[in-house]
Image: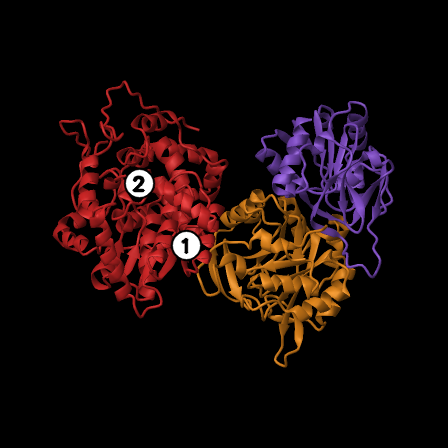
Chain colours: A red, B purple, C orange
Amino acid sequence: MQPTKKRSLSEGYKICKKCIYDNSVPSIVFDEKGICNYCKMTDDLIAEYGTGNSKGQELISKIIEEIKLTGKNKKYDCVVGVSGGTDSSYMLHWAIENGLRPLAVHYDNTYNTAIATQNITNITSKLNVDLYTLVVDNNEVDDIYKAFFLANVSEIDACTDIALAETMYRAADKFGIKHVLEGHSFIEEGISPLGKNYFDGKYIASIHKQFGKLKLKTFPNMPFWTFIKWIAVKKIKKIRPYWYLNYNKEDAKILLKEKYGWQDYGGHHLENRMTAFSHSVYFPQKFDIDYRNNTLAAKVRNGKMEREAAIKEYYETPPFIEEGLIDYIKKRMNFSDEEYEKVMKAKPKYWYEYPTYKKRFERLRPLFAILYKSNLVPKSFYMKYCFPVTYTK
Amino acid sequence: MITIINYGLGNLGSVQNMLKRIGAPCKITSDLKEIEEAEKILLPGVGAFDSAIQKIDELNLRSVLVHKAKVDKIPFLGICLGMQLLTRSSEEGILSGLDLVPAKTIKFKFENTSNLKIPHMGWNYVTQNTPSKLTEGFTADHRFYFVHSYKVVCDNPTNSILKTNYGGDFDSAIQNENVYGTQFHPEKSHKYGMHLLTNFSKI
Amino acid sequence: MLLIRYIPCLLLKDNGLVKTVKFKNPKYIGDPINTVRIFNEKEVDELIFLDIDATPKNKEPNYKLLAEIANECFMPLAYGGGIKTFDQAQKIFNIGIEKVAINSSVHENLNLITQISEVYGSQAVIGVIDVKKNFFGKKEVVYNSANNKSKFSPNEWAQKLVNAGVGEILVTSVDNEGTWSGFDIETIKSITESVNVPVVANGGAGNVEHLKDAIVKGKASAVAMGSMVVYQKKDFGVLINFPNKQLLNEIK
């Protein structure tokens, strides 16, 4: 097993004085006070969305009313994507508390842990919420993952993100629902640095075309015009309630445990084995990327963790790896030990070396500016996709 | 190092899997020399008594197994049919067992009116009889997977370390000094099986 | 006391898990290995895997996949589907699977059961009885994915299987399978009362009450569940789950 490369604090790294992003984070800029632009972005979002204050409460109350009105004669008035994790489980609870009638939607990439499925079972049955699932064919999804391995790029689990988004849209469309609720919280998760990784439907298709073998029949990809169909024709809105509310992940966990017998899987995204592998093994070992800094930086910014403690955890504690996880991934990918080592040691490649829609999104910036203002795409999408990025290699 | 005896009958893969999971080094072999040098022996077994004895004798394993158990006195564990093989004989067959524990193997017999089916198949509880290193830390919750039509009866009650109820109590685990036997399958009994095998690995 | 066994019954097709209704219209459920991992984590009592394509398409069991499945399992496993010869059964046992479930091939060759049980013991062989109502409402024994009929009644066939040496019988109601409407208690009871080996009820489980009926009214020793453990609810999304153990422990 390759050891995680150690970052040395004495090697001339510059760290934000407020959070813990350092100068290896792409597109980072420090102001005269030594505070980074990501902290500033967070402050701007808080101002715009009124996060945790009366402005935010007012904005989200209006949205709740809009959801109820639009969905009045339908079986469900909103879609909530569920994974068994904290954010999405709490989102379901929040939706019911606020009188909404959600349909829970799950994209099963065939790598769920028992904890994830148990959490989904408990919360949907206690709240009496119906569940819609799209399960991808395990041969197809493994073919896509293997293609990403062989392409040597970092976004190995991008296909899950796209597939979940597409699945939620399909479920919304099936039942005539116009609002999709997402459990993303920039306060808790931080802002994913621009340019570090990237994905869209074309990226997935190009990597698979070049390195995959099977025809994809069940995988729910989202090509450009399908995306436009959902947002501009069907006008399905994406709402992120945690951007408006005082959402606290730790408190949410306590409530979920008490009320729904929810179980903790120990870390962001570790409820799914492929995401656990990508975060704990693939990114650190092959790309020297440790995404824990996103959540740790966020915790420091919102005062939930001491900056020193976050730095210590990030630099001194290696990521947790579930026993047998790597062997399991090798088994699913059908890699021998040698093939796996070869892939892990190969030179990394980057998203901009493969065909994507990025330039198209940049050209359509004015259109997406309008779309984000109507909540048809999240603002973070606009910021990340529609502007050119400076990437440090 | 636990040496798992391969005589052609038994759930070798599953036993090895669980030993790997608990971090106990093990190897599977039918080689006389390797068995002679073994520090700890595990004798699995699934199937019919005579079939097993025949295979053991065909491979000339009887004398080395008996030597390791009685003379070298290394820790020795027989599982399921493997436990029955430790007795002197079984009603299931006509050949002699290894006679490492003073006991015999007989068929389950129930009245026609009883609801009890044969084989005894499924999860059942165990209660401790004579204390043993193999069963250290066991609680009332400990249950294991059984699947057998014949049961072992010890000549001497003190050799019985666990009892299980199925139409009456029978010996579900036995011990004679360094030789142990479990009628149930620890390798198919989740965490309870892991507990027992961990105990065995430490003996 | 011997506990009642609650067994997820999973259907294999190609390399994936599927679920059927009345033996038709297979719908994709997910990856077999990951599903086994999940049931393993839930400490489920036992698992049954049936390959629904093996016999109709005359295929060999998928040994590679079965080995990977067996590797993940710390509880007993049974496999059925396309087993016609002693050698195939032997391969299955060597992989680390405890029991083989045989249906179609024994309708032409009961001796296969005797062959296997003489070497591996009767507890290693499950006799499978698929029951389907004919046009006149009479229950018949069927095989080859319910495409062929046997001239024997369910009870007669059960007797023959036991005499040949099976240690257990799996009774599946084709008409109830995948319907969430409950087991065919009548047939189950009739078989459990006529044989001395454990009987596993299969086909139709929709809730814990049904499980209770199979045990208390049907006198089954164990119950198998299909749709109930792979879907969140009837007609809803795929979600691997298992009934709450406390609820199950209350069934006596």
Measuring 17% from the left and 50% from the top, which residue is drawn there? A360
Residue at image x 30%, y 47%?
A184
Provide residue A200's location: percent of width, then percent of height: 27, 49
Type of amino acid under label 2: Glu
C60 on left or right of A51: right
Q: Quadrant of the N terminus of chain B?
A: top right
- Residue C29: mark: none
Q: Which residue occupies the extreme bottom position in the image? A: C136
Can residue A7 be spotted in the picture? yes
Residue under the image location 80 percent in, 39 percent down: B85
As drawn, the label of residue A188 is 2
Q: Chain of mark 1?
A: A
Residue type at mark 1?
A: Val
Which secondary structure, mark 1? loop
Residue toward you, C40 or A375: A375
Percent position (x, y) of residue B182? 74, 39
On what subunit does the disc labeled 2 rest? A
Eye-nearest disc, 1 or 2: 2
* In the image: residue B66, left or right of residue A86: right
In this picture, residue A99 sits left or right of residue B113: left
Q: Is residue B197 above or below residue B141?
A: above
Whole-angstrom CA distance, mark 1 to mark 2, is: 30 Å
Check disc 1 and report the residue beneath it: A136
The quadrant holding residue C179 is bottom right
- Give the side of residue C249 with respect to residue C239, left or right: right
Whether pointer 1 and pointer 2 mark residues with C-beta atoms closer than 8 Å, the reply is: no
Count of marks overlaid on the render: 2
Residue A13: x percent and y percent? 24, 23
Q: Is residue A227 visible?
A: no
- Check the image and report above or below for B75 versus A259: above
* Residue C178 percent coordinates (x, y): 54, 66
